[in-house]
Amino acid sequence: MSILRQRVSRARRIAGLRRRLRSELRAAGVEGPTPMAEICARFGERRSKPIRLLAVPMEVPGPFGLWIKTTASDVILYQGTGTTRFHQEHIIAHELGHLLADHPSDEGDDSMWRMLLPDIPPDVVRKALRRRTSYENEYEQEAEALATVLLEATVKAQEVSLPGRSPRARRAQTSLGDPVDVL
């Protein structure tokens, strides 16, 4: 297949995934500002399979998140320290993109993984951590495209505003319900 045909095929697949995601968001009743935890809960209910979110410290450089599929639930691990809440939402949206695009889940210090994720065999976690993190990978490009749609659909990218500098301005902004936590 020529490079042009490959690119056209990939663009069509991503466009189809975007349409499917928008349809899923409508069916789940997600509109406007919605935290990724709520989106995951709603998608989990629709699929009759919970999506568990686990914030864990991950080494940098390295992956910021990963998705592990089990028979009982889907587990999204995301960088729990050293980043902003907005970045964490993006990581979750990216991993949710893998799940929603029906990508294969990567399955595969035993004691640490058993402690953090007692329901997931350590070999499954090890394999997931070896996932290629390059955005040249077709799956990564698709997951990133879906993450963008998720964040746009939930208005996260448009909500970012820094709190006022004075304590009084911050209290006022908080009491007005500013949902963004970028600090």
Image (cartoon, helix red, strand yellow):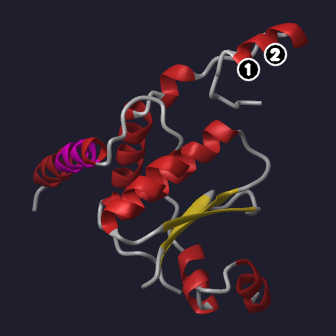
Q: Provide the residue designation for mark 1.
A: 174
Q: Amino acid at mark 2?
A: Arg
The image shows residue 29, relative to residue 112, as above or below, that is above
Q: Quadrant of residue 173?
A: top right
Residue 49 appears in view: yes
Residue 149 percent location from the top left of the image: 35, 38
Cα–Cα gap, marks 1 and 2: 5 Å
Residue occupying the far right of the picture: 167
Which label was assigned to residue 171? 2
Q: Amino acid at mark 1?
A: Thr
Q: Residues within 10 Å of mark 2 (few under 14, many from 20)?
A: few
Residue drawn at x 49%, y 21% is 158
Q: Quadrant of the C terminus?
A: top right
* Horizontal relation, residue 168 to residue 123: left or right: right
Which residue is more in the foreground, 64 or 167?
Answer: 167
Residue 41 percent location from the top left of the image: 47, 56
Residue 71 percent location from the top left of the image: 42, 85
Residue 17 percent location from the top left of the image: 23, 50
CB atoms at circles 1 and 2 under 8 Å apart? yes
- Whether residue 90 appears in magenta in the rendering, the answer is no
Range shown magenta: 16-24
Residue drawn at x 31%, y 48% is 28
Residue drawn at x 73%, y 55% is 80
Q: Residues within 10 Å of mark 1 (few under 14, many from 20)?
A: some
* Horizontal relation, residue 41 to residue 166: left or right: left
- Whether residue 20 appears in magenta in the rendering, the answer is yes
Q: Quadrant of the N terminus?
A: bottom left
Which residue is more in the foreground, 123 or 179?
Answer: 179
